[in-house]
Every structure is written in C-alpha cells, then in structure tokens.
Image (cartoon, rainbow, N blue to C red):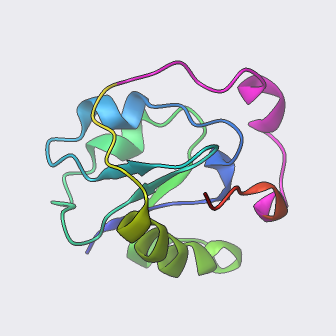
Amino acid sequence: MTHVVTEACINCKHTDCVEVCPADSFHEGANFLVINADTCVDCMACVAACPTNAIYADSDVPADQRKFIALNAELARDWPVIVKRREPLPDAAHWAGVAGKLDQLQHS
C-alpha cells in the first residue's frame, strides 16, 4: 500500500507532510505535491500532518479522486523530490475548501 495526494492539495501545497516523511517520498510541482509509490513506506505520518486532508491510503481514496493514484505515479517520475517544509502558496486558505480544481493543476 502507498499514499496518494488528492485534489485538496492543488493551489494550497502545504508542506507539513514533507517534513514528517521519513522516506523523502514527496515530489513538488508548481502548485501540487505528489507521493512516489516506489519509495513510500506507508508510515501514515503524512496523513495526520496534512492540514487540508488531501492524503489518503491508496485503498481509501474516494471514488471521485481515484484518478489521482495514476497522476501521483506519473508526476513523481518527472518532478523533483522535496525534503524541507516551505510556506504554502499565498492563496492556500482560499483554495483549501474549493472542489473541482483539477483543471487548476500545473503539470510543469
């Protein structure tokens, strides 16, 4: 099992999860984080650390968010690893409660 970052992270990018990850499994894009399933050790520390409740065990990802399992795997191959906490994006508070924001994801 691994963990998956879902839509709630888009345009927020809190990095509290990065700070607690013992395996350095997070990868960073412009406005989203992903987890590398190949390095995730399933410790669940990131789930509790995420202030937007964006991280799930892959078996618990809500049905409407299942596309993020493949998206995490795809983007983790291309995006750099992030190992230190950074400030969230400037409009994170606004975007935290917004649903349907997949179209906002910046792939580069």
Residue 58 falls in image quadrant: bottom left
Figure label count:
0
Residue 44 inside the magenta-drawn segment: no
- Residue 39 in percent (x, y) is at 18, 63
| Side (left or right) of 100 relative to 36 | right
- Residue 82 in percent (x, y) is at 34, 40
Can residue 57 be seen here? The reply is no
| Side (left or right) of 77 relative to 20 | right
Majority secondary structure in the magenta region: loop
Residue at (15, 49) in percent of width and height = 23
| Side (left or right) of 19 relative to 60 | left
- Specify the quadrant that holds the C terminus: bottom right
Can residue 94 be seen here? The reply is yes
Between 55 and 23, the one nearer to me in the picture: 23
Image position of 19 with respect to 46: above or below = above
- Residue 2 in percent (x, y) is at 29, 69
Between 81 and 94, the one nearer to me in the picture: 81
Residue at (64, 62) in percent of width and height = 107
Image position of 79 with respect to 58: above or below = above
Residue at (27, 50) in percent of width and height = 44
Residue 100 falls in image quadrant: bottom right
- Residue 29 in percent (x, y) is at 54, 49
- Specify the quadrant that holds the N terminus: bottom left
Residue 40 falls in image quadrant: bottom left
Residue at (39, 51) in percent of width and height = 27
Residue 98 inside the magenta-drawn segment: yes
Q: Which residues are magenta?
A: 85-102
